[in-house]
Image (cartoon, rainbow, N blue to C red):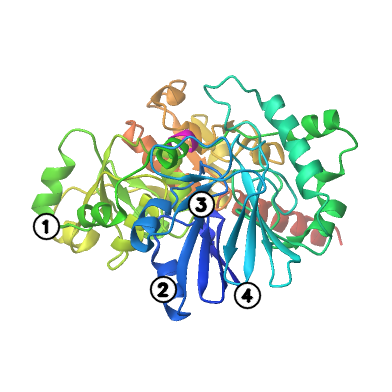
Amino acid sequence: MYVEQLYTGCLSEAAYYIESNGEAAVIDPMRDIEAYLELAKNRNAKIKYIFETHFHADFISGHLDLSKATGAPIIYGPETEAGFKVHIAADGEKFTLGNCTVQVLHTPGHTLESSCYLLKDETGRDYALFTGDTLFIGDVGRPDLAQKGAETTSAELAAMLYDSLENKIKPLAGDVLVYPAHGAGSSCGKNLSTKTVSTIEEQKQTNYALLQPSKEEFIKAVTEGLSEPPQYFPVNAEINKAGYAALDKVLENALTALSVEEFENAMNMPDVLIIDTRNQTAFVQGFIPESIFIGLDGRFAEWAGSLIDFNKKILILGELGTERETAIRLARVGFDKMTGYLNGGFEAWKNADKPIDMIIEVEADELEIDLRFDEQAIVIDVRKETEYADGHVKDAANIPLATLTDPATMSPFEDTDNIYVHCQSGYRSTIAASLLKRQGIHNLRNVAGGWQAIEQIKEIKKEKSVAALN
């Protein structure tokens, strides 16, 4: 028996490849399926099943393309309604995989169709549980996503989740491995660990949700303190449920190399956006006007899904050689309307003497001086509300980045205001600055290093004060 976790860091997503005696299964595959096909080929195995724990909201699954490539059936748990051919497994149904068995445990709560898959080894012993978004390391799946537009409430789903955990998962042997679908950084929970594997016993001892003394306390614990989910979650869930275009076709369009003239003509068409994926240092020094910065070196796909309208056509601009990676990562969260990239990148645009915009950056100490002497200075903190609550610049306006898609967000500010934007380290504030520029606000400065740099200045001053007293 062989088990491999395939982890996609930018989405904090874990897919799984399990194999026994030449037969393999893939659980919760990403949209780009090459890794699974290559793994099976290298191990001389045939992919026999594709198991889905639920309709994912935070990425597009690869079930359709993988099924087409392998002939393997797509398996979901009870209460599944899909727009394509699936095998809807019964609760407790078993699937033979080589000398092992995979058993379906229907565990509604995160969603109605949510199911876990229990892998039994060659001796019939329970070996590992693939928990999807039902049970994470340190948390459980949030129960507020699936009920949008439906009659089921978050509290009702949380009650179902409690029953699923109590009746299906907690009774398993303590040494059974827990393999979840997500780790720290995912918006599918609020307390996910950086660890990506655990055991039933460890979770029973340490997971706050499993330690609640009653169903009522559990419901309260898992429904309180949930942040607003990214706006692309319902879009992705619906795409996964209804079906989608083959990735090969999406990439064919996205990877069309456009000359400067072709790119310029395309960007001037209606409903077109340019996404610039270069690093933030390069972007602030020069970019195509009205481009939106989302650097590949951050949580790129998640921010794209949160900020970009899925109905827009996307043009890609990035470092040379990153075009395919950019297109795949956009496709992972459901962007299928990519129409090409700028051949030669930003240098080609600049060399053609085309219009260029830029963002002024200031250091943290410059911000401090300006705030002392400039009455028109306004600080915009684009971090999350929880980050802001832990410490912020005095009188700073907290406008979380995810809200900047609405032009009305900026209505309190005037052209005469000198705006300073910052986040925790500089990545999100650069995105914010590019969005503000698109909304016609150009009198702004990005604070290099963000709150981390501001805090560092404070610490240096404190140390100097102590030294002077001594």
The image quarter containing residue 124 is bottom right
Alpha-carbon distance for marks 4 and 3?
45 Å
Residue position marked by numbered label 3 in the rendering: 426
Residue 202 seen in this snapshot = yes
Residue type highlighted by circle 3: Gly
Q: Tell me the tag on residue 1.
A: 4
Do labels 4 and 1 touch, CB within 8 Å? Answer: no
Q: Which residues are drawn in magenta?
A: 231-235
Q: Mark 1 or mark 2, which is nearer the start of the sequence?
A: 2
Q: Tell me the element at label 1.
A: loop
**Which residue in the rendered view is the most extreme toward the left?**
261
Mark 3 Cα shell of 10 Å, populated few (<14), some (14-19), many (≥20): many
Q: Tell me the element at label 4.
A: loop
Alpha-carbon distance for marks 2 and 1?
34 Å
**Residue 464 percent coordinates (x, y):** 75, 59
Q: Nearer the viewer, residue 408 or 22?
A: 22
